[in-house]
Image (cartoon, rainbow, N blue to C red):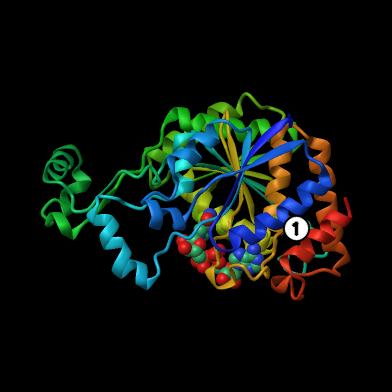
Amino acid sequence: MAKYKIAWLPGDGIGRDVLDAAKIVLDKLKLDAEYIHGDVGWEFWCKEGDPLPQRTIDLLKNVNAALFGAITSKPTKQAEEELIPELKGKGLVYRSPIVRMRQLFDLYICLRPCKAYAGNPLNYKENIDLVVFRENTEDLYAGVEFHPVPEELSRLLGSLSKNFESFKNLQSNEFAISCKINTRRGSEKIIRAAFEYARKNKRKKVTIIHKANVVRLTDGLFLETAREIAKEYPDIQFDEANVDAIMMWLLKNPHNYDVLVAPNLYGDIVSDLCAQMVGGLGFGCSGNIGEKLAVFEPTHGSAPKYAGMYKVNPIATILAAKMMIEWLGEKELADRLERAVAEVIKEGKVKTYDMGGNASTLDMAKAIAEKL
Ligand code: NAI
Ligand code: MG
């Protein structure tokens, strides 16, 4: 029996292309794993009314980790007109499978390392090496939203908050409310994870991202929690930054930062900026990590126009596979894989279209596999 069980979730579009590429590399690396296919994505939403069928959820309960490609979540015009009214008529609502996995399995860490590999023509600056810890289950992504706004909610808010005055006479369908929910426990978990990572990986500094001067209570709780936890890690420098300011500072001086930790929405935004500085969608990898399960993925979507063409860059997915291997505890294999990726990038002989070359998805994977 293989040492690890890994759920293999290609999803839609180029998700399949890039997972085929990752498989070439994993096979060459001889990771002692069994890969078990799981159905996920737009196809299953159309066929079965569920983009994350129960059988896939059951599979995820019985694996060590998962590698996920990408899913299509924006309806085409035809689907919008024909299919969606039919599914909606049956009371079915599309929910992002990745968001659902995060909630079902409490994958509270979204980890996004952003490293500028030497020789990558898409690097914004050389030697960028940032790691973003984004809280993955709460904040403005809690999914507690109202439109139209129920009258009882409006009345309650009117009686509880002075700031609600200017909204309270609006018609229920003329405004929408989204709840930003931040818990002390959730904040603590992600902040602690960032500090632990920093310590384990000999990182110097953790920067907490917030907007507590305006969003006083929710971000305030996050910041307060961070300050408390920071005291337990005197060996690591602690730094605070407003989310708007850090977007400017990151662009100006990315080398001043190391590990960044943020609530869900700010983390989502900051991690895209960081990914772009080290090559963009073809290089952005991420891990959705919980206590029992972790799902690794490239951050790009299904890019329908390139689906099945084996044209896109698989490095993001191969780096996600590297993160997975590391998370499984196979640090040596993970390091070997990263060195192979770095070597191919540095040589600059094999480049996909985004890097200015014409190598295919599988050419890139084979070039990396050859270095292993
Ligand atoms: P996308 O990320 O799929 O692609 C946008 C463009 O970026 C592509 O057309 C391509 O030019 C480039 N690109 C993407 N991945 C690349 C790669 N590996 N190498 C080189 N170039 C790459 O975003 P888009 O087009 O906005 O969304 C397509 C579908 O994917 C939508 O249904 C969207 O909702 C979904 N999506 C899914 C995500 C996920 O599965 N995690 C994340 C983002 C979008
Ligand atoms: Mg994003």
- Image quarter for ligand 1 equals bottom right
Quadrant position of residue 80? bottom left
Residue name at image x 53 percent, y 69 percent: 304
Amino acid marked by disc 1: Ala
In the image, is 10 to the left or to the right of 371? left
| Secondary element type, mark 1 | loop
**As rendered, which of 10 and 284 lies closer to the eye?**
10
Q: Is residue 103 visible?
A: yes
Quadrant position of residue 142? top left
In the image, is 291 to the left or to the right of 179? right
Residue name at image x 39 percent, y 65 percent: 75
- Where is residue 203 drawn, in percent x and y? 74, 39
**As rendered, which of 332 and 109 lies closer to the eye?**
332
In the image, is 28 to the left or to the right of 20? right
- Crowdedness near tag 1: few (<14), some (14–19) or many (≥20) residues, C-alpha within 10 Å: many
**As rendered, which of 242 and 126 lies closer to the eye?**
126
> Which residue bears the numbered disc 1?
116
- On whether ligand 1 comes within 8 Å of the CB at mark 1, the answer is no
Residue name at image x 57 percent, y 27 percent: 229
Residue lying farthest to the top in this orientation: 232
